[in-house]
Image (tube, helix red, strand yellow):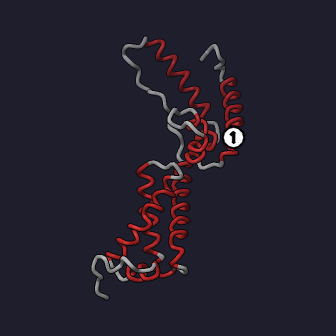
């Protein structure tokens, strides 16, 4: 095994030299790569408006991918681009995974003791019927409608990133989802007077 370099030895190295040293286990070379490119990787992940934990996961996975591909980087001087593309792919993978998760009901199923019992039973029953109607929508429509009506998602950019869909698809998907939801609600006899 090659001897490890001392801190500072990797400072004036090119990307090709840093990758070669890192492949041999040189911690100073890894430190220099992290110092140089970690901010880039994190900024790419943050541009997808991921939660802090997801940004951290994307960053770690991107660096893991570099470890796995140390010997296959064809143009080391374009490492910044390679890392940015890898971070972008990992961010999209996180968004795709999140988009497959079914939205959870946002209704508290336990009655408040201060609320009239009969009124709370009716309210819970109406809420249950409404969520049953939402459950009949496609997963994409469900996720979008829930995202659009959450207060912390205040821009289409954030909604697009959260739902992993192009901004141009939000309006048509919302319209189809609301139209179908309206039909479902009407079909269940939950008109405006009932809600």
Q: Nearer the viewer, residue 115 or 162?
A: 162
For this orientation, the residue located farthest to the bottom is: 1
Q: Dot 1, how many residues are within 10 Å of its Cα: few (below 14), some (14-19), or many (20+)?
A: some
Quarter location, residue 131: top right
Q: Secondary structure at mark 1?
A: helix
- Residue displayed at 41% across by 79% down: 18
Residue 41's spot in the image, x, y percent?
Answer: 47, 62
Q: Nearer the viewer, residue 81 or 162?
A: 81
Residue 31's x, y, as percent?
A: 35, 71
Q: Position of residue 193 (x, y in %)?
A: 63, 13
Left-right relation of 125 to 180: left
For the C terminus, the quadrant is top right
Q: Position of residue 15 (x, y in %)?
A: 46, 78
- Say if 119 sits above or below 171 in the image: above
Locate residue 188 relative to residue 5 in the image: left or right: right
- The residue that disc 1 covers is 173
Return the residue nearer the eye: 34 or 48.
34
Name the residue rendered at 70%, 45% in the picture: 168
Residue with the most extreme front position: 12
**How many discs mark residues in the rendered view?**
1
Residue under the image location 41 percent in, 13 percent down: 115
């Amino acid at each position: 095994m090659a001897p490890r370099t001392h801190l500072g030895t990797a400072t004036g190295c090119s990307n090709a030299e840093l990758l070669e040293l890192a492949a041999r286990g040189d911690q100073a070379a890894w430190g220099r790569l992290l110092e140089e490119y970690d901010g880039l990787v994190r900024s790419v992940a943050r541009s997808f408006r991921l939660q802090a934990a997801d940004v951290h996961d994307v960053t770690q996975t991107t660096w893991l991918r570099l470890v796995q591909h140390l010997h296959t980087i064809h143009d080391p001087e374009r490492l910044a681009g390679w890392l940015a593309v890898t971070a972008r792919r990992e961010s999209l993978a996180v968004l795709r995974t999140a988009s497959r998760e079914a939205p959870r009901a946002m209704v508290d199923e336990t009655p408040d003791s201060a609320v009239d019992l009969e009124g709370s039973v009716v309210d819970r029953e109406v809420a249950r019927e409404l969520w049953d109607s939402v459950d009949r929508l496609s997963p994409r429509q469900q996720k979008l409608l829930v995202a659009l009506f959450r207060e912390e998602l205040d821009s289409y950019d954030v909604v697009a990133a959260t739902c992993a869909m192009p901004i141009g698809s939000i309006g048509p998907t919302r319209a189809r989802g609301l139209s179908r939801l309206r039909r479902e609600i009407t079909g269940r006899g939950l008109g405006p007077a009932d809600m």
